[in-house]
Image (cartoon, coloured by chain):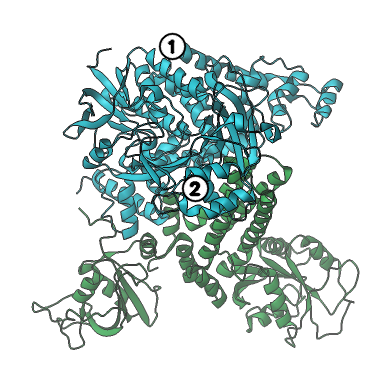
């Protein structure tokens, strides 16, 4: 592929960069993907897993938007579990352990075999800027590439600085060089650059672990794939193991606390509260007698084990001693030490909801550079950035997902209107106010139509998604029209399932609403259902069972949509608006809300402030329509 | 065209129209002091000067009522009122803006002329409720407090005013805010187990959550239940006197009123229509209604009166069913007892000064709440206490009562969401739905404080305020 007439340049080939590049290509763009290390495409820098609560939801949405992550983990996953199966329909979430090396290879080969996509090694140092518009990039070796739009997905590489005890090493992650020049360049271009911290665990040699004494955590018996497009799961499935820290572990850490990079004052930035280092846990929860450690395999062909829960920046000798205070790990050898890493990010409030920079046209940011953490968050942002970069080149309006439409919509709205507040942003289901609408099972129903319309799905896939929707519709019609009559064997079957007998004919749809009813019960009662209802039509079942709650959330979502539809026009200067306190003005100036809904969600904004803006809007609009001012 | 919103200065007569001795004209906005300087003169007749208006210090001044001023700024010889001026610099004022209050002589004319002078000097007339709206927009009041201002103004008894004043001071808002935090806390207990599926969480988490939800539900429904009392405190209550002819209704009516109003005669059926008077009982403005003597008589006029009397009783907050203590109850009395069985009522035995005509424990008759004698004025204090007990429920809300139906509805909704959350939690199902119900309860409390549906709420609420506050 010739490196001219490019539509989109993507900088970085991690989880964000991959989805950005592939989304752009799916729309027909000519794309160049630049990475500083071609051997680390799709690298999982931290834990060897995809999904989890909130994150699994993102993967399903990425899949519904034609993305790659779900397919890739289905092909390379070695343990699959559904979490929260008994806690409610919308918090059910998929999670899988990945074979890291396979995942990398699979992603790289996918990129290499994608027509219209160029994959090159090169460290980008500068952007080419013409006026207010970014028109390309320059690498450290002086290569210049020009394109209609540029997507930066730099991960933890911007001025990355790793800490182990009192040792400090510049680097993007263990084994990779940091990007030095780019963040200073971004700062010089006026972007608000800040600093965040994260960390990872040491890796252990599995041959030195005594698994026989540890609790086994197997995967699901009949695991379900992430992707709509996966025929099934192919890799051999392996278990994880669980162990716990001991009082010796805690005493050892307490004794060596000042030697931890995080506690010696060498790292100023705060780490994420939801992903604390083991030092943090011991300091913040001194009463806890033990902390859970999951031993996760890093792959089928490697002995490396990821001890999830042991993230640390203690010196290597303390890490080694600490590991050996843990049951099963008494003889364990560390093959790579854990470390903390500080890196630069750009305050995402500098972005539009399209992920384009407010002050630099055609520059899109995605992944950890936006202040997020997590492969799934990165991938989702990457996909949206690649999509909107391509649309910008074509002068098409950006695609912005609503908060009641997708977790991706929740995340981007949170980022651009609230910022990240000092710690990396991670997806939680509790961030979504309309959680019951945003389920894993209905991701395709929610986003499939849009994905088809904007061209993210190829023809066969679009047809398959449409067919699935029609199957669901006819299934609902079948349930609506099927009557179950009171007969002895019917009532016997119901009684056996602890369901009360019927005296009148009951529609199948109403019977299915009973909490204890499921597809199997309907089959027992003689309802002829398609064979794939269990695997393909969970949504139909859950929509029925939770209809009252789902409707309630839809009503609420519509109300919020009203606020979200009220644009705050550019002519309304929030920094001088009478009736707002100085504090509120300052916060609004920082948040730069573009709708009343965003203003309402910005931190520290009082209802009175929202009311004030609303009143101003109404009055000014009135004055304008009367032809005054 | 017009000045931007909140950038202009508004004026209105803040006191009720009528023949009061003193009235207040209030100015609020950035030009309040300037407008005041333009309309006011010192007692010597000159202009007030740069420091003539010191914040939070009252002063005397003069104000020309015709608006004719001579070229040198001195008053033209016309009607001049002597006024008391209270200037308040922002933010230490009701609206949070510069405010000047001008106390002038009352009546129908003077305040209107003072207002006209202010308008001529650059203020514009305030819309209904605009002072309170500005206080809200400037962050001086939240919605619950702003509404309490209306209740305070409308208060008809000291107790009603006291209840409203507590809410203006923010007591309701504080309690709601505290509950909101408690709910947030409770919700976080549910959310942590949803978002951190694999974490080891305390085993007591769910029982802890259950206890919190139960306690909050009880507290919130207790406050919701005060609306019945709150409504009566704010709007007053209707109490109907019902009884057979000559049972002593009109005598008791007069006795409770403390003066004669109803015509009292020994001839049954004297009071054919109903009459009403307002009397304060234990802080409630009670509209006391004396009905036609109820009898299953043949006379057409009386019959219509009976139907009307029972109709009145059904629409009342309380019915006093009077039984003549000097004679044995007859079938008419028993029918009345039956007809009012489902109403909120007090059975009153009248004519306690006469020899008892029946035993208090006589079968088939309801418990007599109190025996009174209008002649000897005995039992009246006890009756008032009983009436108050029926009209105002004892609350376990530290005396806080709900004064707005909107609040009562939202509180009841919050309580019902919490009830549902508890039920689901106890059934061991779907923690996610528990979290959703807690969220819905929070949203209901937010509504009272004015944290959602802002637009509609503002329109509805501010249009209810009278001019001035």
**Is A148 rendered above or below residue B443?**
above
Residue A5 coordinates in the image, percent (x, y): 22, 17
Indicate which disc residue A273 carries.
2
B72 relative to B86 in the view: left or right: left
Determine the image quadrant of residue B320: bottom right
Element type at mark 1:
helix
Element type at mark 2:
loop
Query: Please, which chain is the residue tagged with disc 1 on?
Result: A
Residue found 75% across the figure and 67% down from its top: B294
Q: Are marks 2 and 1 on the same chain?
A: yes
> CB under 8 Å between callouts 2 and 1?
no
Query: Please, which chain is the residue tagged with disc 2 on?
Result: A
Give the distance between the C-alpha atoms of the residues marked 2 and 1, in whole angstroms: 44 Å
**Pointer 1: residues within 10 angstroms few (<14), some, or many (20+)?**
few
Chain A visual colour: cyan
Chain B visual colour: green
Residue found 51% across the figure and 52% down from its top: A256
B292 relative to B75 in the view: left or right: right
Name the residue nearer the viewer: A357 or B367: A357
**Is A430 rendered above or below residue A301?**
below
B257 relative to A11 in the view: left or right: right
Residue A193 coordinates in the image, percent (x, y): 30, 43
Q: Is residue B444 visible?
A: no
Q: Nearer the viewer, mark 2 or mark 1?
A: 2
Residue found 56% across the figure and 39% down from its top: A552
Indicate which disc residue B394 carries.
none
Determine the image quadrant of residue B232: bottom right
């Amino acid at each position: 592929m010739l490196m001219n007439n490019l539509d989109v340049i993507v900088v970085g080939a991690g989880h964000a960069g991959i989805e950005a590049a592939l989304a752009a290509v799916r729309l027909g763009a000519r794309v160049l993907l630049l990475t500083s290390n071609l051997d680390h495409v799709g690298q999982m820098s931290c834990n060897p897993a995809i999904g989890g609560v909130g994150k699994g939801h993102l993967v399903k949405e990425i899949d519904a938007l034609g993305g790659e992550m779900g397919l890739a983990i289905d092909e390379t996953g070695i343990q699959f579990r559904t979490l929260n199966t008994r806690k409610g329909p919308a918090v059910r979430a998929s999670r899988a352990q990945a074979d890291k090396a396979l995942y990398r290879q699979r992603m790289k080969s996918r990129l290499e075999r994608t027509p219209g996509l160029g994959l090159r090694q090169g460290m980008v140092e500068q952007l080419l800027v013409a006026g207010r518009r970014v028109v390309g990039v320059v690498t450290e070796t002086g290569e210049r590439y020009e394109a209609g739009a540029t997507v930066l997905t730099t991960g933890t590489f911007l001025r990355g600085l790793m800490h182990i005890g009192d040792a400090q090493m510049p680097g993007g992650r263990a084994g990779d060089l940091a990007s030095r020049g780019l963040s200073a360049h971004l700062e010089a271009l006026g972007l608000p650059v800040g600093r965040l911290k994260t960390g990872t665990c040491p890796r252990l040699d599995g041959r030195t672990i005594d698994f026989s004494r540890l609790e086994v955590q197997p995967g699901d018996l009949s695991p379900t794939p992430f992707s709509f497009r996966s025929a099934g799961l192919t890799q051999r499935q392996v278990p994880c193991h669980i162990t716990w820290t001991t009082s010796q572990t805690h005493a050892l850490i307490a004794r060596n606390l000042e030697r931890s990079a995080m506690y010696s004052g060498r790292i100023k930035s705060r780490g994420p509260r939801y992903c604390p280092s083991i030092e943090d846990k011991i300091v913040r929860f001194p009463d806890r007698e033990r902390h859970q450690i999951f031993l996760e395999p890093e792959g089928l062909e490697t002995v490396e084990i990821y001890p999830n829960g042991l993230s640390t920046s203690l010196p290597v000798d303390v890490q080694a001693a600490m590991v050996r205070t843990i049951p099963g790990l008494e003889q364990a050898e560390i093959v790579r030490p854990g470390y903390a890493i500080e890196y630069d990010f750009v305050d995402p409030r500098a972005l539009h909801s399209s992920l384009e920079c407010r002050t630099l046209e055609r520059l899109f940011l995605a992944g950890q550079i936006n202040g997020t953490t997590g492969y799934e968050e990165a991938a989702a942002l990457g996909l949206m950035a690649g999509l909107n970069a391509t649309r910008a080149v074509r002068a098409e309006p950006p695609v912005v997902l609503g908060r009641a439409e997708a977790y991706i919509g929740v995340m981007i709205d949170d980022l651009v209107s609230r910022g990240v507040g000092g710690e990396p942003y991670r997806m939680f289901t509790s961030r979504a106010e309309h959680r019951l609408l945003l389920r894993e099972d209905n991701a395709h129903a929610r986003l499939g139509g849009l994905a088809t319309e904007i061209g993210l799905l190829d023809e066969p896939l679009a047809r398959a998604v449409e067919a699935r929707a029609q199957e669901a519709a006819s299934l609902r019609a079948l349930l609506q029209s099927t009557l179950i009559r009171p007969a002895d064997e019917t009532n016997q079957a119901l009684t056996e399932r602890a369901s009360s007998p019927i005296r009148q004919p009951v529609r199948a749809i109403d019977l299915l609403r009973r909490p204890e009813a499921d597809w199997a019960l309907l089959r027992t009662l003689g309802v002829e259902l398609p064979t794939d209802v269990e695997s393909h039509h969970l949504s139909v079942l859950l929509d029925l069972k939770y209809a009252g709650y789902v409707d309630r959330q839809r009503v609420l979502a519509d109300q919020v949509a009203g606020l979200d539809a009220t644009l705050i026009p550019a002519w309304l200067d929030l920094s001088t608006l009478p009736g707002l306190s100085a504090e509120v003005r300052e916060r609004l100036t920082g948040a730069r809300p573009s709708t009343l809904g965003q203003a309402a969600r910005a931190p520290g904004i009082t209802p009175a402030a929202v009311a004030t803006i609303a009143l101003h809007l109404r009055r000014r609009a009135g004055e304008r329509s009367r032809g005054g001012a | 065209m017009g000045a931007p919103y909140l950038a202009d200065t508004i004026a209105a007569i803040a006191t009720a129209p009528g023949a009061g001795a003193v009235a207040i004209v209030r100015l609020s906005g950035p030009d309040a002091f300037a407008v005041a300087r333009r309309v006011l003169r010192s007692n010597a007749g000159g202009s007030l000067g740069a420091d003539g208006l010191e914040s939070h210090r009252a002063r005397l001044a003069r104000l020309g009522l015709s608006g004719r001023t001579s070229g040198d700024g001195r008053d033209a010889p016309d009607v001049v009122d002597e006024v008391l001026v209270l200037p308040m610099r922002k933010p230490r004022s009701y609206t949070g803006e510069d405010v000047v209050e001008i106390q002038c002589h009352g009546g129908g004319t003077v305040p209107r002329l003072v207002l006209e002078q202010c308008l001529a000097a650059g203020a514009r007339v305030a819309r209904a409720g605009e002072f309170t709206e500005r206080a809200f927009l400037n962050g001086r009041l939240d919605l619950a407090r702003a509404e309490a201002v209306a209740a305070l103004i409308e208060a008809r008894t000291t107790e009603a005013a006291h209840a409203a004043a507590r809410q203006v001071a923010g007591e309701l808002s504080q309690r709601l805010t505290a509950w909101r935090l408690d709910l947030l806390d409770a919700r976080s207990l549910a959310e942590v187990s949803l978002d951190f599926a694999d974490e080891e969480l305390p085993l007591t988490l769910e029982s802890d959550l259950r206890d919190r939800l139960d306690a909050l539900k009880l507290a919130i429904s207790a406050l919701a239940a005060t609306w019945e009392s709150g409504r009566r405190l704010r709007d007053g209550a209707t109490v109907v006197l019902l009884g057979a002819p000559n049972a002593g209704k009109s005598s008791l009516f007069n006795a409770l009123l403390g003066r004669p109003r109803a015509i009292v005669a020994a001839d049954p059926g004297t009071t054919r229509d109903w009459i009403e008077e307002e009397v304060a009982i234990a802080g409630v403005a009670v509209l006391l209604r004396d009905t036609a003597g109820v009898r299953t008589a043949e006379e057409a006029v009386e019959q219509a009166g009976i139907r009307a009397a029972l109709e009145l009783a059904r629409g009342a907050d309380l019915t006093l069913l009077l039984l003549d203590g000097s004679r044995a109850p007859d079938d008419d009395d028993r029918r009345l007892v039956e007809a009012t069985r489902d109403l909120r009522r007090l059975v009153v035995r009248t004519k306690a000064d006469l020899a008892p005509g029946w035993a208090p424990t006589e079968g088939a008759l309801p418990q007599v709440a109190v025996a009174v004698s209008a002649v000897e004025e005995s039992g009246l204090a006890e009756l008032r206490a009983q009436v108050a007990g029926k009209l105002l429920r004892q609350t376990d809300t530290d005396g806080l009562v709900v004064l707005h139906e909107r609040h009562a509805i939202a509180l009841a909704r919050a309580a019902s969401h919490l009830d549902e959350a508890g039920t689901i939690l106890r059934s061991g199902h779907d923690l996610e739905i528990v979290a959703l119900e807690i969220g819905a309860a929070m949203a209901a409390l937010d509504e009272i404080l004015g944290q959602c549906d802002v637009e509609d709420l503002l329109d509805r609420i501010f249009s209810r305020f009278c001019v001035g506050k």
